Amino acid sequence: MSTAEDVAESSQYVTDAQAAQQANRVVGELAREADQPMDVDIDPDRTRETATTGFSRMRTGWRPGEAAEVAGVVQQARGVIHRAFPDAYLVMNELWSLVREPVVNTTSGELVTDEFGWPQWKKHPSGAYIEDYSRLTGREKDDFLLRITTGLLEWEQKSSTLWLEAMLAKGRWEEAMATGFVAPTGRVTVEERTQRGRASAAEDRYHAIFRAAVSRSAEQLVRSLERIGQRLKDSLTA
């Protein structure tokens, strides 16, 4: 084998000392990669089946069994938000009770509630809620505005705490990935170390994704409440 080939082959392997130095770089690249669209290598023969090669192997639904699993995870994330912000949902449901029509069980006459115990509201055939905000009096608007404004202090702090949890989960995932990357000994390529790192950190990665989703949901909830408060304020001064 020539000297150039020797260098090329040896460059594929990473010593234990080099692994520790490269772990942070590889983990950082993988963390950024998680936020990027996936690139799929399409078989040339497959592209002949459609003029739009990007759609030739696209799935539009979950695999069998995945849909229920994903729905369960989504439900768990929603549960975290409802448990963290019960007073926020209380304010909104009290407001909706004045402008919307509840769904009533025609047999028992009881209100139909969702999985969190809040009333379900009637909708148009289009899916939009049946509501009339002209029913709100000036006094009611002022009361909701005050409750939302004062509640934002606590809600913003809770949202920040959930963001901190998301960052800690991300840090734990990166540590697990780095540990898996460095663990192998001997002549191991970067690709092999990366795959072992991915495998050892898979559970931590999904936990980080879950916590990031919860944090994003909390952030959006607080922003929505801010906008509702501003709209109430505008309607009072109009």
Image (spheres, rainbow, N blue to C red):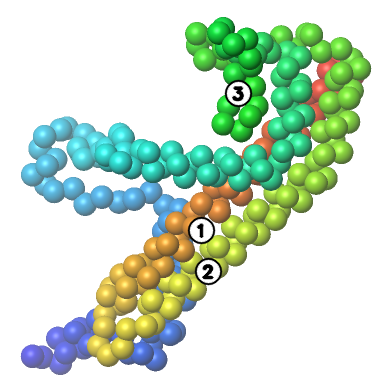
Q: Are marks 1 and 2 in contact (CB under 8 Å)?
A: yes
Residue under the point 53% across and 63% down: 170
Return the mark for residue 113. 3
The amino acid type of the residue labelled 2 equals Arg
**Which of the 4 image quarters holds residue 184?**
bottom left
Residue under the point 55% across and 62% down: 169
Return the mark for residue 108. none
Q: Work out whether residue 132 or residue 70 is closer to the camera in this orientation and state it.
A: 70
Q: Work out whether residue 197 or residue 11 is closer to the camera in this orientation and state it.
A: 197
Mark pair 2, 3: CA separation:
38 Å
* Mark whose residue sits in front, 2 or 3: 3
Q: Is residue 200 above or below residue 56?
A: below
Quarter of the rendering occupied by the C terminus: top right
Could you classify mark 1 by the number of other residues whose Cα lies within 10 Å: few (under 14), some (14-19), or many (20 or more)? many
Residue marked by disc 2: 172
Q: Is residue 138 above or below residue 186?
A: above
Q: Is residue 197 above or below residue 85?
A: below
Question: Nearer the N terminus, badge 1 or badge 2?
Answer: 2
**Which of the 4 image quarters holds residue 13?**
bottom left
Kind of element beneath mark 3 = loop
The amino acid type of the residue labelled 3 equals Thr
Q: Are marks 1 and 3 in contact (CB under 8 Å)?
A: no
Residue marked by disc 1: 208
Mark pair 1, 2: CA separation:
8 Å
Mark pair 1, 3: CA separation:
31 Å
Q: Work out whether residue 115 or residue 227 is closer to the camera in this orientation and state it.
A: 115
